Image (tube, helix red, strand yellow):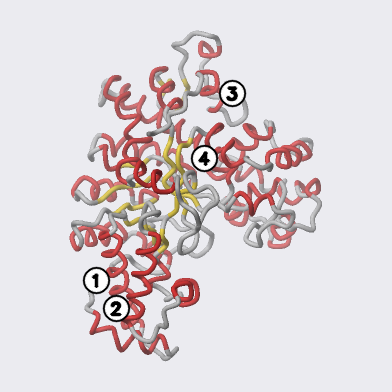
Amino acid sequence: MTHKKTVSRRQALQALGTVSATAFLTPQATGADTSAALSGPGGNAHPTIVSRVFQTALIDTHEHLHEEKDRLEKNPHPSIKTDDWSLLFSHYLDSDLRVAGMSKDAFDKFFSRQTDPLEKWKFLESVWPAVKNTGYGRAVRIAMQRLYGVEDLSAATVARAQAGYEATRRPGFYRRILCEESNIEFCQVNAGPFRKSALPTLLIQDISIVGMFAGHNFESFGKPTGIAVRDLADWHRVIDWWFDNYGKYAVAVKSQNAYARDIDYLRVPAEQVEPVFKRVLAHEPATPEERKQLEDHLFWYAVDKATEHHLPVKLHTGYYAGENGMPLGRIARNPGSASDLCRLAPETRFVFMHIGYPHYEEMIALAKHYANACLDMCWSWIINPVAAKDFLKKFLVTAPANKLFTFGGDYTVVELVHGHAVMARQGIAQALTELVEEGWLSLSDAAELIEPIMHDNAHRVFNLAEKTRVLENVKW
């Protein structure tokens, strides 16, 4: 049974503001009139749309969240960069800081555990005006306003931000932020080969397959199986082990290999790459073409195994995290390569992530043409919220609406998921209202799309009813 939490109209309108609850409201919308509208780039969002968008529970299809216990430790997990209000700047917005000109020295001191939290503003102050209106900056501002009560970050409010951070980071804060504040029913998390989460029915896990075929992570993937890897057949058995043991608990498999290469995987027979695998295993040289053939073979081995276990295959496409390293020419080829994958495996359900930004027109064409292609808007609302809104408008009048997922925070820091979710709800409301205003949808058609694109599509494609039933009784 699904849970769809009801959010009051007052909560919905409050959630829409970055700086204040009425920041996006027209003058007539600030009273008690139930026809109040949300102001946005396309005009005023219809009250029916606003109400339904904020009452509908989101299914969050992609996160990298730490476990709550790691955030609560006196000495947090080493992967958690810092442990004060600056942590909200440590995922994605840290790249904007560097690109905006923050020096390496200031950057290191800003995120250092040795720097007094109340002294950190001086390292941020000069670049904050340049980044605070980006999607990354906006998510931070919304989170601080909604969770910490900080309307505008400044030297005068840093102490309040730190107090808010400390007051928020308490046992149970994941469920409070995700379920109560953000109205999220499930989060799908990608963390390592497969994480045995302490919150298994809230933080539902993907199986990561990239280490199965790229880089051949013998330590993380091979060692837990107890299988001695001597040849390619043994490595196949390692891959089988992960699916046999965790396929029934996982919601999907995920690969971010597009950060390293094109996603142009060809079906290469095992006998062709067996000698290459043995050389790689022995740390002997292999040409780039040989390595690509081996990766291609193992990619399809893992994908076919996922398909046997009825698991969708999530693939990164488009924009790269980080800074000063993205090869735009290569990511422009993602849509074409994705179409080849769909043809090569018509029985596999592919989920192409991040709308392939900035090449989202081609990705819409892909979803319109291929029955086994779904698109995921995870990350997109904070990369470019206006483009994400336009993508949603174009998708809904082009491709079948049952092939779309509209939210995934894609964060390691749970507070930021809330900021991102508010942005997504605002964007969904704006997109649907503009389609109604422009005459492409009737109001009733727009309203009928809300639950499918925010909740029902993901629930169906990722088989969440069955996964929940299994995970309710899991004993790690």
Residue displayed at 29% across by 25% down? 448
Instruction: Say the numbered circle drawn on residue 21.
Output: 3
Q: Amino acid at mark 2?
A: Gln
- The quarter of the rendered structure image containing the N terminus is top left
Q: Is label 4 in contact with label 3 (beta carbons under 8 Å)?
A: no
Sequence-wise, the earlier of marks 3 and 1 is: 3
Cα distance, mark 2 to mark 1?
8 Å
Sequence-wise, the earlier of marks 2 and 4 is: 2
Q: Is label 2 in contact with label 1 (beta carbons under 8 Å)?
A: yes
Foreground residue among 17 and 192:
192
Tag 3's secondary structure? loop
Cα distance, mark 3 to mark 1?
52 Å
| Residue 75 percent across, percent down from the top left | 73, 57
| Residue 377 percent across, percent down from the top left | 39, 44
Cα distance, mark 2 to mark 3?
55 Å
Cα distance, mark 1 to mark 4?
36 Å
Question: Badge 1 is on which residue?
Answer: 266
Residue 449 in which image quadrant: top left
